Amino acid sequence: MTSENIKTRDTLVASATSVAWIIALNKPVYPAYVWFLAEDYFRVSLLTALSLPLFAALPFIARKSGFAARAGIVAIGMIDTTFISFALGFETGAWMFLLPCFMLAHGLFYEHEKWPARIAAAFGYVAFLMIFYLKDYAIAGEIPVEQTTALFAVNAVGAASLAAFIVLRFPRMKRP
């Protein structure tokens, strides 16, 4: 962003950075949930914090390039979700965080930026296919069903909560 754009802040960039902060602030809390609900997953869940610096950096990147921040949160979110899904396993429902990523891919690009939006959507679709078809290769290994079920519930609520935040945070379109 130029110095003029910082003063007249782009609402999509503001939305992207608020989502990035929400994700970054929740990254350290996630392993605590896992430790409480599915202790056998705890050590592997610590890997989820690896992306925290990337999400935390996005608001600062937005000062230089709004597009980079908008595209960055989509890309980082999809890569992070794919990695976590492979770490924890398909049965934990970590893949459900791709749904808010798809929402971001649709909502963070302007009409004239249709190709970045299409590429992001295609990237998300390929990520889901990889997670789905390689679901037997989880880093976590065999975990008791009751812990997997508990973690599935946490991830379902987390993905739905993030999706709800995105819906509430993004600007509404004005009538023509």
Image (cartoon, rainbow, N blue to C red):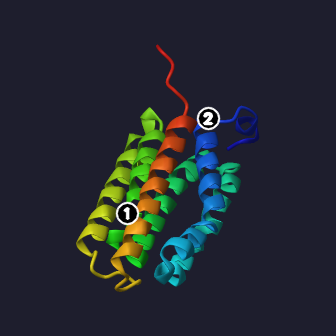
Residue 51 at what x, y percent from top left? 57, 69
Identify the disc placed on residue 77.
Answer: none
Vertical placement of 80 versus 156: above or below? below
Q: Do the CB atoms of the residues marked 2 and 1 lie less than 8 Å apart?
A: no
Q: Is residue 151 left or right of residue 69?
A: left
Residue 29 at what x, y percent from top left? 62, 66
> Of residues 134 and 45, which is closer to you in this image?
45
Q: CA distance from mark 2 to mark 1?
A: 28 Å
The image quarter containing residue 52 is bottom right
Report if residue 57 is visible in the image. Answer: yes
Q: Residue at x 47, y 15 (%)?
A: 175
Identify the disc placed on residue 11.
Answer: 2
Q: What element does badge 1 sit on?
A: helix
Q: Residue at x 29, y 69 (%)?
A: 130
Total numbered labels placed on residues in the image: 2
Residue under label 1: 95
Residue 14 at what x, y percent from top left? 64, 41
Residue type at mark 2: give it: Thr
Mark 1 is surrounded, within 10 Å at the Cα level, by few (under 14), some (14 to 19) or many (20 or more) other residues, namely many
Mark 2 is surrounded, within 10 Å at the Cα level, by few (under 14), some (14 to 19) or many (20 or more) other residues, namely few
Q: What element does badge 2 sit on?
A: helix
